[in-house]
Amino acid sequence: MFKRVIERKAVRAEATLQADIRQFLLDADLNLGEQDLLTPVLEAQVGGGTGHRIDIEMGATVIEVKKDISRPKIRKDAVPQLAKYVRARTEQRERRHVGILTDGADWRAYTLVNNELNEVSHFDARERNVKALDLVRWLEGVLATSEGAAPTPDAIATRLGADSVAHSIDKTVLAALYEENKSLPTVQLKRDLWSRLLRSALGAQFEDSDDLFIEHTLLVNTASIIAHAVMGIDVKDTPPASLVNGQLFTQARISGVVESDFFGWPLEIEGGEGFVQDLSRRLAGFDWSRVEHDVLKVLYESVIAAETRKKQGEYYTPDWLAEATVAEAVPDPLNLRIMDPSCGSGTFLFHGVRRYLAAARDNGLPLREALDGLHDHVAGIDLHPVAVALARVTYLLAIGRETLTSEERGPISVPVYLGDSLQWDQRTDLIDHGHLVIQTGTGNQLFTNELRFSEALLQDASRFDSIVNELADKAADPHRAEGKLPSLSALFNRHGVSGVDDREELTDNFRVLCDLVDEGRNHIWSYYVRNLARPMWLSRAENRVDVLVGNPPWLSYRHMPSDMQTTFKEMMQARGLWKGFEVATHQDLSGLFIARAVQQYLRDGGSFAFVVPNPVLDRPYWTGFRSGEWSDPDHPVKVNFTGSWDLRRLRPHFFPRAAAVIFGRRRSLAIGQQGNSAVALPKQTEIWTGKIAKSAARWERARGWITRKAGELRYPKDGLISSPYRDRFGQGATVVPKVLFFVQEQAASPLGLGGGRVSVRSQRSAMEKKPWKELSDREGTVEKQFVRPILLGEHVVPYRIIGADKVVLPIEGTNTIMDGEHDHLDRYPDLAKWWRDAERLWDDNRSSARLSLAEQLNFRKKLTEQLPGAPLRVVYGASGMHMSAALVDDPNAVIEHALYWATVATRQEGMYLLALLNTPRLTEAVRPLMSYGKDERHIDKAVWELPIPDFDPVDVKHARIAEIGELEARRIAELKFEGGKSYIQIRRALRDFLLSSTDAEELDQLVTELIG
């Protein structure tokens, strides 16, 4: 049936296609039945006396069928027709309807925006490798017909993720609602406060856009609905206001899960309730009682763009690692208060809650008492509102539905807060003479009221949250007359507020809240106050926690916006964490984040455990962090590091970079103790190796796949004497953009070209970047002497060069680079035309005017240093997990920047170096010195940190190493490689060949003796 539907045939009647599509919809697993209200109906009457008929109608979807919509004119005529039907059904049934225009092969989904039909998704069923199931999944997103679907990670990503048709429809509708109502005071207020809070948290990296506000609104409302669904509440029959504002949770005495926040504005505008209802129907298609908490992590990752998460350094931790880390860091959960200062979707919180409740059960603690203590024992903070919304649901899942519905439990407050643990601006303006001060003005208001709360009121977190919630609710009570101030006596008595000053202060705050309601600027002040107050309160010395645990943001300096780089550098320098020069770009936010989190939230003597990038363990640019001396001039911090887990050998990789876990304790800095030394991160570590099955989500299963053994870290340059070859090897030239230089020779015309000239055309690469990849191929003729071979990393395999590319370079004689203004360029008319055209393209498309094309080509003199070409050069690849080196005997060849090179005096010296560089023993020795991401991947000049001596032909070992190198080079020269094999496959085959060589064992022994 799928094949019949997608096959365009000129002879096929529209009625036949309609019937085929209807049958396909019935046959597909869309939860439809012949008697179902959603059963597709052919030729449904539009009504209203129009006489028009809808081709296919099912539920809230109108399908218009045409024989062939590949022609623009047919689509142009069909869309207004479809729009009439969608408008009619929307008005008749007072519910949002969507439209589909299709010819069976081309499927287009539409929704009304400002009463006009907008296309929101397109599916081409005739694309290569598209299957019937792909079309069914697309239709599910439009039709919202699924029921009882298991909320697996794949299903969540496919049906709710940013690339799903459902997400496109919902976001388009929500964006239209916002555009129509963004000038309303209540919407403006929420937008302004959202912006204010995130700007203070994210600084320069915060993108203050309407699109991001809409995205956050959609995702937080989605999380709110899911929060109800996972508790067994039928979200289809629950009023939208209750879903968004959390009245059912309030009635159940569960606070801090779903509440009125920045994102409840749809309820306050026309059409907003209908939007929430449609969103609820879609989410009700999943059976949320079967949810696993890690699915919320998948939801977050599938809806927040990878680039956005990268900007904020967010990488989510596997459950088994979070569970193992919490178990190690929290040995006595009933007597340790823990916090995750960057909690994300709540993975560490989940295991913290589970560990606390398990300990409570084991110790016979009554359920009510255990839950009363939970709020103070496990807390989290994150700066992303979507992550916080999901983390709160995760916290509930950790408590468990059975516990939540128990008659024994009392009130529950979920302590997950929206805030900035790092506090970029290190603001102190929120505290004034022992009071938390919140400005309530927005926009350009000249005079603003303040909300002021004494630190005494902030002491009991749960009590403070309840008081603020009740004040806000009482102020917003529709029965309160405008300008009137109801009595707060009952509230004071209920919460034990007996002090005169406290009562007067709360009354003043209540008066401000009532004024805000009367001005139409209420609803979220309790949310805003509590999320500003709690992180600030937790940072007070007397309120700090016993354990910090989590995965801080990983963000390299080179990926930060310029304003953020400036602040980051200043804060790093103030704490002795900054390393400049060539390693500056490798500096990472995670170190500063940990230093700030320990400074603000960890008590003296408290411990911490953080998942970090693996370079923390041994790279030189982390030396200041590893020292444990974080010398903030105002609040110095010293820590005793107690150990680490080295996870770089685990497979598969679970982060974009290799990981580790570090453990430590904050030192007490009492008066007179400033001189006490911190304890640096020990060299002794625990090395984890193994390949972990995908099914091993829990630590109980994952640990069986892991081998743990004691090991010792090796710091680059530690105790090493650099090789004298270090200064002899240099990096090749930067010959980019390739479209301006790289060419393929073309056959001459039957008339020929004349002596000394060659026809060339651009050699293109899939790796080109914008704008260069958008340029057309270049064609022309140049003098042969200016076409040179160029060696790239892919041309070098152990002991052998495999081919070369060709480039046009304006090199005259032995070492003169000519630019467009050079006196000699016009002596070579073909080159002059080619080169000046290249300069024009460079000037028109370059990102910076700092360098001319000739200066770019000879950047840092990496081209002229190769001129004139030497008769013998050793080259090796700058990147990769394994060394690959070869001898170059063509003095005309240019070495590109993916290779390092050095001239050797004799072939014997060259073979000495090749034997050393290509042996597995050297790769093993250099790996701890290499920079890496997921694996060690940048050899660069790290190899010359090893004590490789200058070649001495008189030295017996040196001579024997060179002799073995010559033997291996001859053997490899005789090998034939199958056509189509990549250089990676050839390198792998040659490594295996060398391992099986008769001289391999002797060479390994010689290299070991040479370098230790």
Image (cartoon, rainbow, N blue to C red):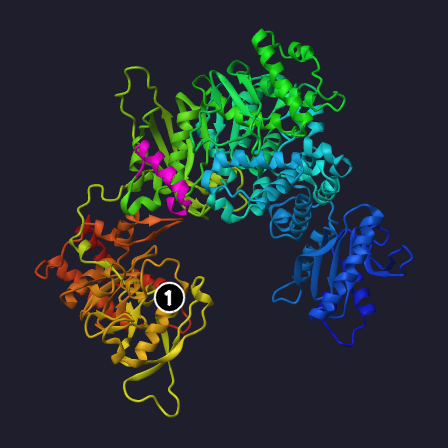
Q: Position of residue 728 (x, y in %)?
A: 18, 58
* Residue located 84% across and 50% down the image: 36
Task: Classify 10 Å Cα crowding around label 1: few (below 14), some (14-19), many (20 and above).
Answer: some
The image quadrant that residue 426 belongs to is: top left
Looking at numbered disc 1 in the image, what kind of residue is underneath it?
Answer: Trp
* Residue located 79% across and 73% down the image: 12
Q: Position of residue 212 (x, y in %)?
A: 57, 44
Give the residue at mark 1.
Answer: 842
Q: Position of residue 764 (x, y in %)?
A: 42, 70
Residue 430 in view here = yes
Horizontal arrangement in the rendering, residue 668 relative to residue 7 (left or right): left
For mark 1, give the secondary structure: helix
Of 865 and 317, which appears nearest the observer?
865
Q: Which region is colored magenta?
A: 557-578
Q: Position of residue 962 (x, y in %)?
A: 17, 63
The image quadrant that residue 897 belongs to is: bottom left
Horizontal arrangement in the rendering, residue 9 relative to residue 866 (left or right): right
Height in image: 635 above or below 180?
above
For the N terminus, which image quadrant? bottom right
Residue 783 in view here = no
Q: Residue lying at the far front in this picture: please name it.
A: 446
Report the predominant secondary structure element of the magenta stretch.
helix
The image quadrant that residue 788 belongs to is: bottom left
Of 135 and 149, which appears nearest the observer?
135
Q: Residue lying at the far left in this picture: please name it.
A: 954
Say whether residue 221 is magenta.
Answer: no
Height in image: 853 above or below 203?
below
Of 972 and 584, which appears nearest the observer?
584
Say whether residue 560 is magenta.
Answer: yes
Horizontal arrangement in the rendering, residue 875 relative to residue 326 (left or right): left
